[in-house]
Amino acid sequence: MTREARWSRGPRLQEAGLLVVILLLGCVLTAASDRIEVRGETVNNFLRFDNLVPNVATPMSWMAIMAAGATLVIISGGIDISVGSIFGLSALGAAAVLQYMPVDAPAYAVLPVACAVPLAIGMLCGLINGALVVFLRMHPFIVTLGTLSIFRGIGLVAVKSKTLPSLGHRLPDAFTDFIGARLYYGGEAKTFIQPVPMIIMLACIAAAWIYLSRSVAGREIYAVGGNEEAARFSGLAVGRIKLRVYVLAGLAAGIAGMVSAGFYQSANTATGLGYELTVIASAVVGGASLTGGRGTALGAVLGALVIKLIENGIDILKMVDLGLFAFYVSKEYSKIIIGIAIIVAVAIDRFSEYLRARRLSR
């Protein structure tokens, strides 16, 4: 088997394993959930369209976009824990500019601004992270730990009202109607879904997949993460590659911030607070190795789906009955489970590295 074949087989096995985990998790949550009555029909509280789309798939959209960006950084051997702050600052920036545009402004005037502002903020923040890592040779964790606080602080200082749009203002309808566009179904029930965040997520994941697996620039990221010294001696511009991945991670956070601001029609200084844990967990659970050199865009979205299913399961179950004893669960339990998921994923990654090293030594 060629090296290229072995390289491509590993991610596929990881992604297949994640699909199995998702199916098993779905089966467990379906079996544990009560049956409820919705619009005259008795349905499973978890396995219903009205739950899986608005409560899992839609809020997962901006998490998966950020997880794809974080995966690029992790593959290169770095880490970015400022992603939640970049996300929040991008959403605030979009709302701050758009609130001063007329509510009935045409789409051709609103949408370019709505895209340009948060994306520019995200890329600028990513550029700052990358420049500090590359030019000052600072550790990525220390850099992004500092910028996490800096970017969050900028939002707190700049936004006096804490929430945007401020009193008396509203985001243009062309922007909110586009991101929050409703697709009705169910006849007279007027039930709807909002597919645009999911469509944007799929477009971003597809772009990240093509970039990583079908471009020279994507393979350079794997090379740097796999062995930075070897990549440097091979003639690769390691500094430029690292700078690029942080800018792309910032871009992903900017896109996610734009989607969130349009979907919720607002942003506040707490937007994205604590998201860095969920984003990194999504990337790591999705197969990105914290030692660098491994990870995929599809794995990132599958990891985000696992995390969101866990959070949604906790919201739905409320109580876990194990027969001998039962206990109530609250939303705070999701933080414990996400932390455990990160530790387990890293432990599995380290064990697989150990087995791989033993095979190579033989």
Image: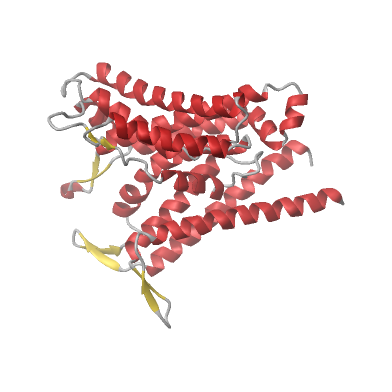
Q: Nearer the viewer, residue 261 or 14?
A: 261
Drawn side of residue 77 relative to residue 182, left or right? right
Which residue appears at 50% of the width and 24% of the height?
127
Q: Position of residue 347 (x, y in %)?
A: 63, 56
Q: Position of residue 260 (x, y in %)?
A: 32, 37
Query: Looking at the image, is 144 positioned above or below residue 333?
Result: above
Q: In the picture, residue 200 is in which quadrant? A: top left
Q: In the picture, residue 150 is in which quadrant? A: top left
Drawn side of residue 309 relative to residue 194, left or right? right
Which residue appears at 33% of the width and 67% of the height?
318
Which residue appears at 70% of the width and 53% of the height?
352
View extreme (top): residue: 109
**Which image quarter holds the N terminus?**
top right
Q: Position of residue 245 (x, y in %)?
A: 56, 29
> According to the image, what is the colour scheme of the structure?
secondary structure
Q: Nearer the viewer, residue 244 or 125?
A: 125
Query: Looking at the image, is 35 positioned above or below residue 245?
Result: below
Residue 287 in sight in this render: yes
Q: Position of residue 5 (x, y in %)?
A: 73, 39
Residue 200 in sight in this render: no
Q: Nearer the viewer, residue 208 or 9?
A: 208
Drawn side of residue 205 relative to residue 162, left or right? right
View extreme (left): residue: 168
View extreme (right): residue: 362
Please state the total of marks drawn on the protein image. Answer: 0
